[in-house]
Image (tube, helix red, strand yellow):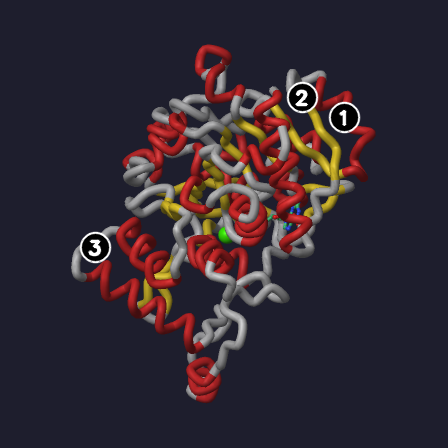
Amino acid sequence: MRPENLTKLKITVLAGGVGGAKMIQGIVNTIEPSRVTTIVNTGDDTILHGLCISPDLDTVTYTLAGMIDREKGWGLADESWTVMHTLEELKGETWFRLGDKDIALHMFRTNMLSKGATLSEVASTLCAHFGITTHVLPMSNDPIKTVLTLAETGEEIGFQEYFVHLSHAVPVSRIRYAGIEDATAAPGVIKAITSADVIIISPSNPFLSILPILSIPDISILLPPPVYQAMAPDQHHKSCNPADKQHINPEIRAKTVAVSPIIAGKALKGPADRLLNEMGIKPTAAGVASIYRDIASVFIIDDEDVALKEEIEDMGMKCLATNTIMHDVESSRNLAIEAIKAAIQA
Ligand code: GDP
Ligand code: CA
């Protein structure tokens, strides 16, 4: 299929922050943006200085608005830091960096939420403000918090404490998504999954960005996640069934393609490689493929990993090797075209 014939497809993307946002940027440069829906992880959401912060939603929104700081991968370009500097002088908590304009957005969100709006409503208000026609949906409007257990002390800590404050430089023995058993998918999420022509699982962090989305009970019926011992399923997790063969949804699997965030055994950014290892999975593209084998029919790896193709195809997935490093919009777009074409042909 020629790229111009792809534009009318309906695409749904599962995304975390940076890896997800770069993937979405490529997709909306290929497909009419209003035909694209992105379901975004909210397990990283936190409250700091009394402000409700949704880092992955903001990374996706700022990227689609063309305002992201590409160098850092998060926050706004052309930011100023007056509030942080003043907070430093006060010896306040400054480990989570918030630019001035970014703070205004968190104030806006916090105010809307305090008046009873949902996170979905905040997301769509912000998209309208920035002229974004892509549908940006939080995975859920219910509070879900990714929490991690430190291997060395057994202490359980919040996501931002791990990711930002401790620079994810500490081994983890357990990950869970607190609140998930009582959560439901946000409005539009289920329809976006069932009605899409193609579902793309971004090269986001599997344990920190994608599995929280898949583990929401009503999403897990359609896209059942595997359950790992290190995710310690307990009585609270009964609603999240492991992907035993009965739960595979062949129709959805056929249209789902996943992209590896691991290239040559390394994450391009962040702790994905170490976390895979800590969760008992090989930190390779094939290890990531094993997570998605029951929900995706196509798995995309980087050219550098072409030697893993057979191992992945033995898992029952079609495997495509291509350039998966998205260093600019053009490379994101090329990857998006490859992913969409591969899903349609599957
Ligand atoms: P976060 O929420 O900002 O941490 O971002 P995500 O979970 O969406 O994405 C993090 C993952 O994206 C990391 O594991 C990276 O290896 C991966 N990643 C980032 N940029 C790229 C890229 O250009 N290509 C691929 N294949 N993976 C990428
Ligand atoms: Ca994130």
Picture layout, residue 62 above or below residue 7: below
Can the viewer see residue 48 in this picture?
yes
User: What amino acid is labelled 1 in the image?
Assistant: Lys
Which residue is identified by label 2?
Answer: 318
Report whether the residue tagged 3 is closer than 8 Å to ligand 2.
Answer: no
Look at the image and tell me in which quarter the N terminus lies.
Answer: top right
Q: CA distance from mark 2 to mark 1?
A: 9 Å
CB within 8 Å, label 2 to label 1: no
Q: Is residue 289 left or right of residue 67?
A: right
Q: Residue at 66% across / 51% down in the picture?
A: 330
Is 193 or 26 nearer to us in this picture? 26
Residue 346 location (% of width, % of height): 61, 20
Q: Residue at 68% across / 47% down in the picture?
A: 267
| Picture quadrant of residue 69 | bottom right
Q: Is residue 326 left or right of residue 53?
A: right
Can the viewer see residue 281 in this picture?
no
Question: Mark on residue 117?
Answer: 3
Q: Nearer the viewer, mark 2 or mark 1?
A: 2
User: What amino acid is labelled 3 in the image?
Assistant: Ala
Q: CA distance from mark 2 to mark 3?
A: 42 Å
Which residue is identified by label 1?
Answer: 309
User: What amino acid is labelled 2 in the image?
Assistant: Lys
Q: CA distance from mark 1 to mark 3?
A: 46 Å
